[in-house]
Image: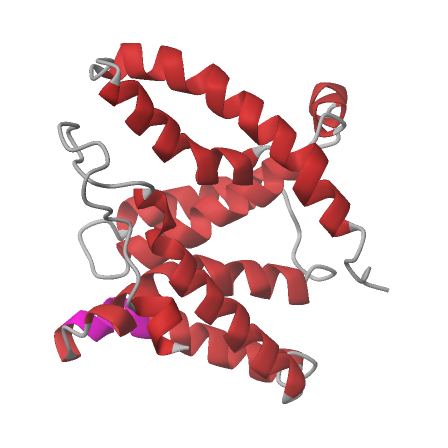
Amino acid sequence: MSGLLFDFGSVLPGFFPDNPFPNVINGSLWSLRFEVLCYIGIAFAGVLGIVARKYLFLILSISFVVLFPIFPMISSHFIIGTLLYVGTPFVIGAVFFVFADKIPLNVTIAIILSVVTLVVRPTLLFVPVFMLSLSYWVFLLGFLKLPTLLNYNRLGDYSYGFYIYAFPVQQIGAQMGMTTPMTNILFALPVTLFLAVLSWHWVEKPMLRFKVKRE
């Protein structure tokens, strides 16, 4: 497991040797190993009954989030530090899910969180509070019942496809000489969108049929 998660890299000698990011196939995949650990962690929490005991789960989640800004003062361990960094918004999202029936979504709370974020900006709490504030805004906007947004949702969710395919497409564009931000974007955006659409309709959406719906 350790070898699969942490020993592989995105560098492949001979590919894109003259690009601004030489020999890199897909640098975006660096986070997958940590996402897998997050999913393993939440699975164990579910099996052990921690998720079902909501307030115990909340206490452990708060402890995880608090540890994130403190950890660099204790250790410089890369894997644990990065796991805390990637895991903090994951844990926040899990708490939102577990307490979905108790967390109100309104603009007033979102604005208050934004103000608190600005207040704590000079402190160690800034990043986790910013993550909380940003997550809240994402949920607030995501659950708005606006006709335009609802119509867009019918098209599909292409976000994961953008995450997976954007980097290699940009590398191909750079190899073709499109190394300035604007020219690279003009090339990579439509190509990545096309691949993301195919990925959603041919891979991701069919796989979601196997998902167990929450009662």
Q: Where is residue 36 in the image (x, y as percent from the top left)?
A: 48, 66
Which of 192/60 is in front?
192
Q: Main secondary structure of the magenta part?
A: helix
**Which residue is at 29% across, 28% downward?**
171
Q: Position of residue 172 (x, y in %)?
A: 32, 24
Depth check: 152 or 166 in front?
Answer: 166
The structure residue drawn at horizontal position 53% and vertical position 47%, both measured from the top left corner, is 136
Task: Classify 81 as above or below 209.
Answer: below
Q: Residue furthest bottom?
A: 48
Q: Is residue 88 visible?
A: no
- Residue at image point 45% right, 61% down: 35
Taking the image as shown, residue 106 lies to the left or right of residue 86, namely right
The part of the chain drawn in magenta is 67-72
Asked if residue 87 is positioned above or below residue 187 in the image, the reply reads below
* Residue extending farthest right: 215
Q: Which of these two is toward me, 119 or 84?
A: 84
Left or right of 181: which side holds 100?
right
Placement of the N terminus among the 4 image quadrants: bottom left
Q: How many numbered discs sit on the rendered protein?
A: 0
Tell me the quarter of the picture where residue 144 sits: top right
Q: Where is residue 8 in the image (x, y as percent from the top left)?
A: 30, 62
Whole-percent x and y of residue 34? 39, 64
Q: Nearer the viewer, residue 8 or 83?
A: 8
Magenta stretch: residue 128 in it?
no
Q: Quadrant of residue 141?
A: top right
Specify whether residue 212 is in view: yes
**Residue at the spot 64% in from the left edge and 29% down from the top edge:** 198
Classify 13 as above or below 98: above
Which quadrant, please, contains the C terminus?
A: bottom right
As displayed, is residue 72 above or below residue 128? below
